[in-house]
Image: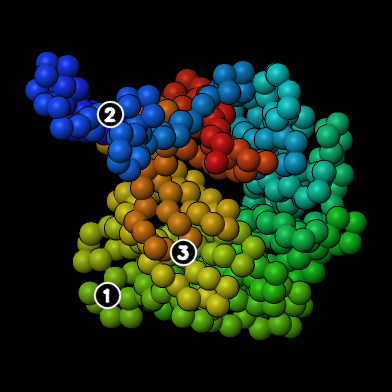
Amino acid sequence: MNLRILVTGLTLALLWACGGGGESGTPDVVDVASGEVAGGDAVEPELPPIKKQWKEIEVARIEGITKVRGFVCGPTQVVADVEGAASKGLYSWQVAGAGGFEKVYDGIGLVAVLDAQVLVAQYGGPNNTASLVGVDAEGQATDLGFAFENLEIRNLLTLDGAIYTLSKDWTTAEYLVHSGTIGGGFNQIGPRVVETGMGFFVTSDKVLMLANAAGALGTVCYENDAKGTADSQWAACPAFPDYVAEKDGQPYSVVAEIYGKDERMALWFRVTDKGVKKWVHYVADSQTKWTELEGFPAVEPTAWFHDGEQVVLGYSAAGDKAPVYTASSEADSPAEPFAFGLPATADKTGVVGFCRADDWLYAAWFEYNAGGSTLSLWRIKD
């Protein structure tokens, strides 16, 4: 209801009741119920903005942990892989159930979802062989045949029934990319890379890898055919933002991540510019035209997510900033705080993962405690 019109209408109504309106006609009065002015146009009521709110799923908590290794959504479940003194391994929360997280597997590592299976990339440290297993709804694990000595899987992705990995060979300190399928084995894509691999993303036709630049401070991007072989050569990603300091005084980044959904991609860089750190964000369309996103806090993200339409970033130790910010993948407006209801962040406390199931966006909240930390599950409906 427009307050000015309401007051004016009430004033006129009182004047009319007191005979102040004369006998020349009926004055305009406000119908408070309908917001209409008699004899005039309808007045649109001014409603307060709708505030979206994160809600905690109070039964979904994992206590006594030190680190969250992975957090993903499946068709009917939310999955977290954690390590800690009291709790460790793979835990599942059923979206349609009334219970809390239940442990389904002992393995600790990165996780991804493929069809009805949760993939767990396990690693026992240098001089050990990494293993990749598929865990079904009953907790039965099947070895997927990823048997490469001294290899640690650093990134694990799935797309259109295929599995993609970015791994480090601890013997040579080189980085390798493999693709495979459940029951079909794994093949190397492209030659080994001597630069330190960081971010990793896959579209329908290409694999992208971020790495530290050779011979300079900075981040570079390489791409290859998503269905390539070991002989397929890596090429520089076209139009990739330049944060390589080839001479003194140039801004550079040695910490960066790439993520996305289908053909839509996003980047964030921690940039050092004349000794000052800042965080820079980009999005790209299917033609790989990178556009900078403004409005995110000057804090390093601890979680990032892209649903094809919006970019969502989560934070720990964000000070007076909100724990979650979002921006359109069209880069047509600055990022803004995303809803409310989450606790305040603190040192080592905040968002450590996002995933989506149906119409719900889930956030993994890590509450740090030196004696044993807690993972809680929050969600919001779009």
* Of pointers 1 and 2, the one earlier in the residue sequence: 2
Residue identified by numbered label 3:
330
Q: Position of residue 56 (x, y in %)?
A: 53, 24
The image quarter containing residue 170 is bottom right
Which element is circle 2 on?
Answer: strand
Circle on res. 250 = 1
**As displayed, is residue 4 above or below residue 128?**
above
Residue identified by numbered label 2:
30
7 relative position to 331: left or right: left
Check disc 2 and give the amino acid type. Answer: Val
Q: Residue at x 22, y 74 (%)?
A: 249
- Callout in the foreground (2, 3): 2
19 relative position to 104: left or right: left
Gap in angstroms between the C-alphas marked 1 and 2: 64 Å
Gap in angstroms between the C-alphas marked 1 and 3: 28 Å
Disc 2 packing (10 Å; few <14; some 14–19; many ≥20): many
Disc 3 packing (10 Å; few <14; some 14–19; many ≥20): some
Can residue 375 be seen at all in this image of the molecule?
no
- Callout in the foreground (1, 2): 2
Q: Residue furthest front?
A: 23
* Of pointers 1 and 3, the one earlier in the residue sequence: 1
Q: Position of residue 193 (x, y in %)?
A: 60, 74
Gap in angstroms between the C-alphas marked 2 and 3: 43 Å
